[in-house]
Image (cartoon, rainbow, N blue to C red):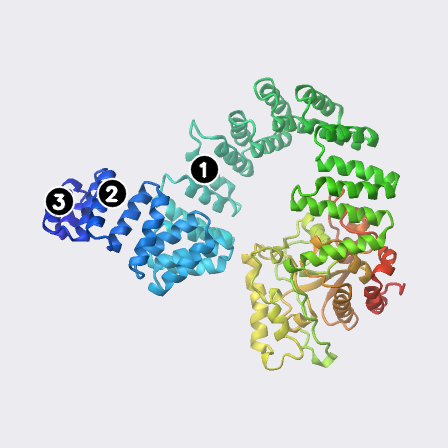
């Protein structure tokens, strides 16, 4: 009879199924499956209360029936009663440790609440019950997604998709993994399949639109977005689609949608910023001013985002901008934003004292306004450095305990003020303390490779140009960019990126490429003294291939020279590069090693490596700088050496240094890009008493690289 009831349920005949189940229950009052079947029939008819009552009745008769507890948990979840579902699921696994579906639901609940570690723990338990179950692969894949491990996520979710083709949960997670790996075409295919199954799912359509858009097909993305543009579409959708329309070259359509978004939600910052840019680009700035003035004349008159947008429609720091700011101040006399905007105008016109006066007004309104306090400190530092030190110490106390980031910022301000005031030993003591506190969050230094004789290197293969290379400041070759800590090599990369050269910086993120240039283990295997662990020629070839094969997945366009910013470097890597150059030269930035040591100490946020002591840091820096000298002087590999000692002074000097080194023009960075990012050339000499042990270790290599002995 149960088979007949199940057939009725499959056919959607819930009333007949319920009637038969009641008759069967009268005959078999101790059968848990009958209770579950009756509850399913009741639930299908919409009688969820009756279904829960049936399960509770069954549990009175069969309190140790794990399947009944599982059915009860499912009904709780349908009612969004997670608080009741969780203990019911726990009871299931307590009664039957091999009840796999309960583990799946528990893990899903944990993921839904962001409890990744708990989901991972449950998955490990479930793995002992059913190791290769596709539902387990889904959980494992979602855990990997949450941890940012896209390769592992794809491994599990692809396996689940093969076993459960068309499952919406699998497709959704698999598509997200493809997005994380920047495999947008695969993501598009996956989300298209999912949307066919869930045509009303807004989030799926949004993901599909993103996947298409990120392939540079804005027009196709716009077509996909059209069904979302209903008469009552919310501002968020209108704004997002408006931006896509702009990208697709449909400026009028984009502006129309963005203006609708702003009218619906005047505080929508993204829509405001986008529509202001569109007005400026299309010459419709008067239309924009009219809309914003209309909105500011009504109930939105005290919306600072609207005022900021209105200010952006005028010439920067011009007379019309001042008029807008004064209107803003009249409407919002106690607001900080118009005071800050007016101070900026004073600065542009060289009116430092007037700007400082406004900063004082801001502090009177909000004593813990860090920017205003630091502005006044900067002015005091110019006038009286020793008094500025006292004031910086007072600010540390004033902001103490507000939040850890602000505490760190104020300690940094205090140490830099000590430096400017010539109190170098005190500044160095603070920097050493900061480094010691943060070392457990930073990477261990690499072990410098064992020096080699000329005949101990792999034979040098001729470096060739990239076939069919597109025009680039790099010529027709990739560049592997590196510099020791304190070299400011990142600004070489930024200069090239500003010149439309693809810059790969993912080695410094939580999703780095999995190639030999990212591996501490590779360095050991390539060392002269690796012994039995030494990499074979075949392994070396595979290492080289891992870099080439990974370029496309990292977003490198075909036939275009790229700059790969390296996290790790050691000349052991030359064993791979000399044999397999793969159209890539070295691009190394250096400064006087003693300035680099000081910079590394003073700016801990600019390098991910530990500074354990002055002596250890100097020894390591000496070793890697000697390697650079070896590569250049012994011509171990094609190398462009960029000396940034003078280039750090300003953006034009940096542009000149990079242009000269590459032999091709590059764009200058924006004004102020280098401000407060380094200490001046030769500044190390002021710290000779405090850091003498380190500078002594670096003297010889500094001379070898062409710098003065003292």
Residue at x-position 87% and y-position 43%: 386
Q: Quadrant of residue 381?
A: top right
Q: Secondary structure at mark 2?
A: helix
Residue 86: image x %, image y %?
Answer: 36, 49
Q: Residue at x 15, y 53 (%)?
A: 30
Q: Is residue 252 left or right of residue 308?
A: left
Vertical side of 497 occupied by 564: above or below: below
Crowding near the residue tagged with mark 1, few <14, some 14–19, many ≥20 C-alpha atoms within 10 Å: many
Of mark 2 and mark 3, the one earlier in the sequence is 3
Whether residue 294 is visible: yes
Judging from the image, what secondary structure is the residue with disc 3 in?
helix
Please indicate, yes or no, whether residue 668 appears anywhere in the rendered image. no
Q: Label 3 crowding class (10 Å Cα cut-off): few <14, some 14-19, many 20+?
A: some
Residue with the mark numbered 1: 225
Instruction: Please identify the quarter of the rendering in which residue 622 is found.
Output: bottom right
First in residue order: circle 3 vs circle 1? 3
- 275 displayed left or right of 202: right
Q: In front here: 81 or 685?
A: 81
Q: Name the residue: 12% across, 52% down.
A: 28
Q: Which residue is mark 3?
A: 22
459 vs 21, left or right, is right
Nearer to us in this view, 405 or 560: 405
How packed mark 2 is, by other alpha carbons closer than 10 Å (few <14, some 14-19, many 20 or more), is many
* Mark seen at residue 52: 2
């Amino acid at each position: 009879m149960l088979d007949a009831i199940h057939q009725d349920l499959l056919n959607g005949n819930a009333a007949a199924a319920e009637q038969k189940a009641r008759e069967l229950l009268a005959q078999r009052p101790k059968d848990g499956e009958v209770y579950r079947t009756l509850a399913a029939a009741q639930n299908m008819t919409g009688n969820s209360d009756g279904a829960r009552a049936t399960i509770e009745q069954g549990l009175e008769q069969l309190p140790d029936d794990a399947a009944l507890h599982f059915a009860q948990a499912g009904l709780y979840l349908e009612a969004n009663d997670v608080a009741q579902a969780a203990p019911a699921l726990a009871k299931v696994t307590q009664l039957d440790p091999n009840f796999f579906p309960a583990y799946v639901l528990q893990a899903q609940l944990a993921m839904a609440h962001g409890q990744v570690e708990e989901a991972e723990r449950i998955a490990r338990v479930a793995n002992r019950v059913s190791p290769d179950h596709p539902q387990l692969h889904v959980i494992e894949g979602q855990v990997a997604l949450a941890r940012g491990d896209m390769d592992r996520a794809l491994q599990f979710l692809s396996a689940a998709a093969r076993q459960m083709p068309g499952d919406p949960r699998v497709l959704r997670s698999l598509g997200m993994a493809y997005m994380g790996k920047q495999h947008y075409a695969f993501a598009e295919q996956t989300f298209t399949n999912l949307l066919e199954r869930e045509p009303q799912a807004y989030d799926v359509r949004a993901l599909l639109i993103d996947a298409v858009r990120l392939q540079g097909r804005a027009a196709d993305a716009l077509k996909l977005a059209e069904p979302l543009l209903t008469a009552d579409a919310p501002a968020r959708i209108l704004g997002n689609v408006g931006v896509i329309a702009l990208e697709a070259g449909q400026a009028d359509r984009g502006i129309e949608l963005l203006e609708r978004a702003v009218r619906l939600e005047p505080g929508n910052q993204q829509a405001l910023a986008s529509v202001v840019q569109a007005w400026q680009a299309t010459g419709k700035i008067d239309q924009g001013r009219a809309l914003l003035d209309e909105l500011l004349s009504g109930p939105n008159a005290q919306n600072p985002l609207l005022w900021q947008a209105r200010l952006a429609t005028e010439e920067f720091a011009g007379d019309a901008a001042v008029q807008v700011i004064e209107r803003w101040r009249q409407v919002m006399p106690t607001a900080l934003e118009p005071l800050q905007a007016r101070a900026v105008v004073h600065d542009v016109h060289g009116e430092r004292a007037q700007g400082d006066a406004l900063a004082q007004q801001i502090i009177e309104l909000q004593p813990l306004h860090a920017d205003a306090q630091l502005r006044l400190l900067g002015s005091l530092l110019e006038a009286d450095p020793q008094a500025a030190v006292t004031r910086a110490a007072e600010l540390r106390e004033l902001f103490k305990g507000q939040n850890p980031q602000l505490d760190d910022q104020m300690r940094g301000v205090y140490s830099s003020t000590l430096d400017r005031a010539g109190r170098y030993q005190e500044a160095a003591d603070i920097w050493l303390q900061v480094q010691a506190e943060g070392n457990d969050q930073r990477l261990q230094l690499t072990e410098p490779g064992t020096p080699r004789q000329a005949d101990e290197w792999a034979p040098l293969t001729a470096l060739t140009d990239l076939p069919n290379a597109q025009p680039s400041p790099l010529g027709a070759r990739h560049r592997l960019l590196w510099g020791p800590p304190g070299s400011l090599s990142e600004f070489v990369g930024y200069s090239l990126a500003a010149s439309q050269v693809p810059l790969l910086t993912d080695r410094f993120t939580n999703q780095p490429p999995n190639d030999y240039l990212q591996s501490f283990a590779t360095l050991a295997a390539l060392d002269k003294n690796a012994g039995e662990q030494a990499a074979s020629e075949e392994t070396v070839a595979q290492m080289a291939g891992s870099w080439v094969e990974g370029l496309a997945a990292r977003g490198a366009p075909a036939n275009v020279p790229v700059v790969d910013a390296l996290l790790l470097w050691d000349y052991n890597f030359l064993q791979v590069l000399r044999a397999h150059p793969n159209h890539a030269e070295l691009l190394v930035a250096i400064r006087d090693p003693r300035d680099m040591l000081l910079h590394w100490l003073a700016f801990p946020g600019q390098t991910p490596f530990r500074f354990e002591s002055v002596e250890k840091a100097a020894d390591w820096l000496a070793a890697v700088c000697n390697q650079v000298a070896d590569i250049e002087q012994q011509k171990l590999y094609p190398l462009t050496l960029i000396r940034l000692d003078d280039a750090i002074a300003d953006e034009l000097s940096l542009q000149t240094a990079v242009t000269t080194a590459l032999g091709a023009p590059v764009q200058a960075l924006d004004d102020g890009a280098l401000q407060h990012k380094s200490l001046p050339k030769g500044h190390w000499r002021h710290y000779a008493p405090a850091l003498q042990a380190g500078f002594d270790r670096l003297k010889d290599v500094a001379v070898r690289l062409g710098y003065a002995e003292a």
